[in-house]
């Protein structure tokens, strides 16, 4: 993978993560805290969390092709690193200050991670189909 493709992926993932966080938090606030509003500080904190989440994608980056087993190991390491980094940041900022908050945040991170991985998988699937179509054309 070229570094330019990696950077595009980081930007795409940042936007997906940020959008997913905003949507999930908006729904949860509507249900549990309907009078609570977003302030500018909250938006910046969400942007920082999204950026950190996207930047940890360097764990998945490899300039060469790697095996499927190696990629699965990297995905597990990436997920665990993401959980630790974001929960630690939440603790430092003061949003995570109890065991219940840690569990809730870990579940939120896991949900957003699954959403991002599924969207990335969909993109990869479309790319593979496009490549296969071009190969069929070349074969003819």
Image (cartoon, rainbow, N blue to C red):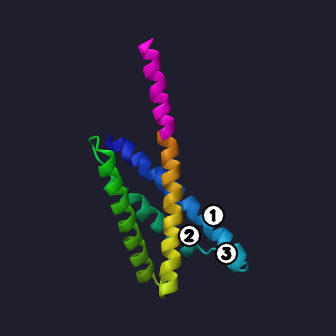
Q: Is residue 136 above or below residue 10?
A: above
Q: In x, y percent, where is residue 117?
A: 48, 53
Q: Residues within 10 Å of mark 2 (few under 14, many from 20)?
A: few
Q: Residue furthest bottom?
A: 98
Specify whether residue 130 is painted magenta: yes
Under tag 3, what secondary structure? helix
Say which residue appears at 62% left-offset and 66% top-offset: 24
Say which residue appears at 41% left-offset and 82% top-offset: 92
Q: Earlier in the sequence, mark 3 or mark 1?
A: 1
Query: In the visual, does 125 lie left or right of 76?
Result: right
Q: Earlier in the sequence, mark 2 or mark 3?
A: 3
Q: Earlier in the sequence, mark 1 or mark 2?
A: 1
Q: Residue furthest left?
A: 64
Q: In x, y percent, where is residue 97?
A: 47, 87
Examine the image and state in which quarter residue 43 appears: bottom right
Q: In x, y percent, where is residue 64?
A: 26, 41
Residue behind mark 3: 29
Residue stretch in magenta: 125-140
Residue behind mark 1: 23
Q: Is residue 132 above or below residue 59?
A: above
Task: Give how far apart the Cα atoms at labels 1 and 2 are.
Answer: 12 Å
């Amino acid at each position: 993978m070229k570094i330019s493709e990696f950077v595009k992926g980081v930007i795409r993932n940042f936007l997906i993560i940020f959008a997913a966080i905003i949507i999930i938090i908006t729904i949860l606030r509507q249900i549990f805290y309907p009078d609570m509003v977003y302030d500018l500080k909250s938006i910046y904190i969400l942007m920082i969390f999204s950026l950190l989440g996207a930047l940890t994608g360097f764990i998945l980056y490899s300039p060469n092709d790697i095996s499927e087993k190696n990629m699965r190991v990297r995905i597990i390491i990436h997920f665990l690193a993401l959980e630790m980094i974001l929960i630690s940041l939440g603790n430092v900022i003061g949003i995570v200050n109890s065991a219940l908050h840690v569990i809730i945040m870990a579940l939120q991170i896991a949900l957003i991670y699954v959403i991002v991985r599924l969207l990335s998988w969909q993109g990869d699937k479309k790319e593979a189909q496009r490549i296969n179509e071009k190969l069929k054309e070349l074969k003819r």
